[in-house]
């Protein structure tokens, strides 16, 4: 079999053969392509090892999600942000101001500490299993390095581990909500492992 015939057979098996073998081959090929080619290339382009992130919790949820109304959301959360000296006008200028939902897929880019601003949504590592993705509410400088403080839009207050986030903990910065809900294709297989209170769809707190 020459190269041309081999390629033709491969192509037919991948895209044209309507059989279980062809379907399995296509799934395996797609998995290998995404794992070994697509993600590494996207990682190089975005400058981070985690170019796409699936939202796994409700900590950044706004009621209505895609149809979220900032005015009504702010009425329920104004007190929390006033304690952080952030007003509604500030929040209206923040990126991804309507938050995001569990199952959303976000595009992540490299987080350059010197360019991060209050209101940016960052991903950072903690002592937990998975990185956390929350909004910056304060930035200070200690010993020549920037230290960040975050909060989840849908959380009632700050968590202990997000009050002082070092530059070394930064994984990336959320640029845009790329594919709403598509992450559920993966999450549905792991939901049963979570505590009952963390399963299912989101509600605004």
Image: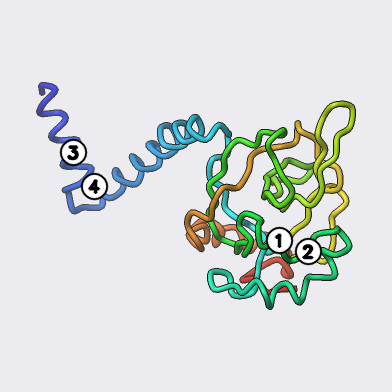
Badge 2 element: loop
The answer to whether 15 is drawn above or below residue 190 in the figure is: above
Distance from disc 2 to disc 3, alpha carbons, whole Å, reads: 57 Å
Closer to viewer: mark 2 or mark 4: 2
Residue at the image point whose x is 58% and y is 34% from the top? 48
Whole-percent x, y for residue 99 in the image: 63, 62
In this rendering, would 24 be left or right of 132? left
Q: Which residue is mark 1?
A: 91
Distance from disc 2 to disc 1, alpha carbons, whole Å, reads: 6 Å
Q: Which residue is mark 3?
A: 11
Q: Earlier in the sequence, mark 3 or mark 1?
A: 3
Badge 1 element: helix
Whole-percent x, y for residue 190 in the image: 60, 58
* Residue 22: assigned label: 4
Badge 4 element: helix
Asked whether disc 2 touches disc 1, contact meaning CB atoms under 8 Å apart, the reply is yes
Q: Quadrant of residue 148?
A: top right
Closer to viewer: mark 4 or mark 1: 1
Distance from disc 3 to disc 1, alpha carbons, whole Å, reads: 51 Å
Foreground residue among 160 and 153: 153
Query: Furthest-top residue in view?
Result: 2
- Which quadrant of the figure contains the C terminus? bottom right
Callout 1: few (<14), some (14-19), or many (20+) C-alpha neighbours within 10 Å?
some
């Amino acid at each position: 079999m020459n190269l041309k015939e081999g390629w033709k057979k491969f192509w037919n098996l991948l895209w044209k053969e309507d059989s279980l073998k062809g379907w399995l081959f296509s799934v395996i090929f797609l998995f290998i392509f995404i794992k070994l080619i697509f993600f590494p290339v996207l990682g190089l382009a975005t400058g981070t090892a985690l170019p796409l992130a699936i939202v796994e919790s409700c900590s950044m949820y706004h009621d209505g999600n895609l149809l979220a109304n900032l005015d009504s959301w702010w009425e329920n959360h104004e007190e929390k942000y006033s304690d952080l000296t952030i007003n509604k006008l500030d929040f209206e200028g923040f990126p991804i101001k309507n938050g995001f939902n569990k199952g959303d897929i976000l595009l992540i880019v490299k987080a350059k500490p010197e360019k991060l601003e209050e209101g940016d949504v960052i991903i950072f590592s903690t002592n937990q299993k998975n990185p956390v993705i929350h909004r910056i509410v304060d930035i200070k400088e200690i010993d020549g390095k920037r230290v960040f403080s975050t909060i989840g839009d849908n959380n009632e207050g700050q968590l202990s581990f997000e009050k002082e986030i070092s530059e070394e903990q930064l994984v990336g910065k959320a640029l845009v909500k790329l594919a709403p809900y598509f992450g559920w294709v993966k999450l549905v297989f792991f939901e049963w492992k979570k505590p009952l209170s963390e399963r299912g769809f989101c509600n605004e707190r």
